[in-house]
Image: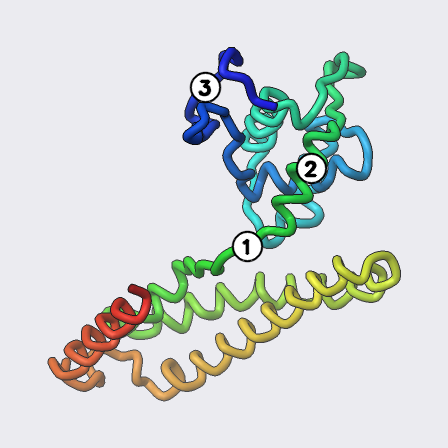
Amino acid sequence: MWKDTVHISRSRYDVNVTGQKTPTPLNPTAGSLLGFLTHGTMTGWDLDGLVELSIGNFWNVTRSQIYRELRVLAERGYVEVGDPGPRDRVPYTITETGRDAFTAWIASDPGPDLIRSRLLLTVFFGDELPPGRLAEILDDARRPHASTLKMYEDLLPHVATTSAYQAATLRFGVAYERAFVDWLDAVSGSLCSSGRQNRTNRPPSRPEVHEELGATARRGSIRRS
């Protein structure tokens, strides 16, 4: 399908031994946009609203990313760009090639999830905080998680009647937020109320603890290799 005469950025293609160009795999954001477009033609504005209400709760996507990915998808022939409508909003329609690309992407192994939490870094080094500060941070973190948990719980009965797959995703959100709130309460109760977070009461640093952490990390590195 891809011809050597097609003039387009090589960064988006791999070249095999026969000289044929094959498209690189979709990234999760592009794949998700194609997934929404399988339900019908939408503008970037429509997609931005859908992302915010749904996958934006667990997959960070900015408006600029959406429009950038739509341009790339159009270049690849995965979406067809329509004429601007009201407010100059441009409609996008998925092509058969785009459907094939989405089908291949959604059936591929998603790979491991990565956790990046600024709060966990704070707790990990919590003994360096001044007295009482960790308790304040945990209390501030608890409020939005408790609010999100209630929102998810209230939303679940409605979602469960419309899509079993989206309901399963939402149940993950409920379980995650509930576990996070419970963890915050447990950490606050064990490290803050007992006064253990106070630097003047903390036990002296033990080199053997850091050595054990290093040994654990090295063992994990060996297993991954």
Q: Residue at x 74, y 32 (%)?
A: 46
Badge 1 marks a residue whose secondary structure is loop
Q: Give the residue at x 50% y 79%.
A: 185
**Where's residue 176, x and y in %?**
59, 69
**Above or below: residue 159 compared with residue 17:** below
Label 1 neighbourhood size at 10 Å, few (<14), some (14-19), many (20+)? few
Query: Residue 169's quadrant in the figure?
Result: bottom right
Quadrant where the N terminus is found in the figure: top right
Q: Secondary structure at mark 2?
A: helix
In terms of depth relative to the viewer, which is nearer, 86 or 143?
Answer: 86
Q: Give coordinates of residue 225: x percent, y percent.
A: 29, 64
Could you say which is closer to the camera, residue 54 or residue 127?
54
Q: Do callouts 3 and 1 mark residues in contact (Cβ within 8 Å)?
A: no
Q: Are marks 2 and 3 in contact (CB under 8 Å)?
A: no
How crowded pointer 3 is (Cα within 10 Å; few <14, some 14-19, many 20+) is rated as few
Disc ID at residue 110 = 1
Kindly identify which residue carries mark 2.
100
123 on left or right of 100: left
Amino acid type indicated by mark 2: Asp
Marks 2 and 3 sit apart, C-alpha to C-alpha, by 22 Å
Q: Which residue is mark 3?
A: 9
Q: Amino acid at mark 1?
A: Pro
Q: Residues within 10 Å of mark 2 (few under 14, many from 20)?
A: few
